[in-house]
Image (cartoon, rainbow, N blue to C red):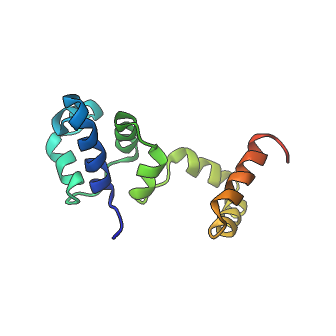
Amino acid sequence: MELTIGKYVRDKRMALYAKDRAFSLRQVAMRIGIEPSYLSKVERGERAPLSEEKIVALADELGEDKDVLLAMSNKVGSDIQDVIRKRPRLFSQLLRELKDAPDHAVVSIIREVRDGKW
């Protein structure tokens, strides 16, 4: 069964709450700027996922990777969209070519680009 963003967020929040009561549903919701009832519904899968801004805030709050939470919400960060828009044909081709590549091959390409070996 695929892990939904709601269950993922709830599991992460509850693990933090077990160690620190500052991670109650109410307090987390208030810190990211939404109603506790809305976060509760998101966690239960009864509401559409949050906006990009709120997902990023929630990721920061929970110490999670924003891109993972965005992907779980079927979203791509606006910064990534901007990169793709600059060269849509090239990035589409690159992503399609990499879709079945093993992780180590993708990591190798990232390192080469980052280290300027192109």
Q: Residue at x 63, y 59 (%)?
A: 103
91 left or right, relative to 18: right
Q: Residue at x 23, y 59 (%)?
A: 45
16 left or right, relative to 53: left
Residue 63 placed where, x, y %? 40, 36
Q: Place residue 98 in its image quadrant.
A: bottom right
User: Which residue is farthest right?
Assistant: 118
114 left or right, relative to 15: right
**Residue 28 seen from this side:** no
In the figure, 91 relative to 65: above or below? below
57 left or right, relative to 111: left
Question: Could you tell me which quadrant the N terminus lies in?
Answer: bottom left
Nearer to me, 85 or 56? 56
In the figure, 115 relative to 73: above or below? above
Q: Residue at x 74, y 53 (%)?
A: 109
Residue 27 placed where, x, y %? 20, 32
Residue 116 placed where, x, y %? 82, 41
Nearer to me, 83 or 7? 7
User: Which residue is farthest front?
Assistant: 19
Residue 77 placed where, x, y %? 50, 48
In the figure, 97 relative to 87: above or below? below
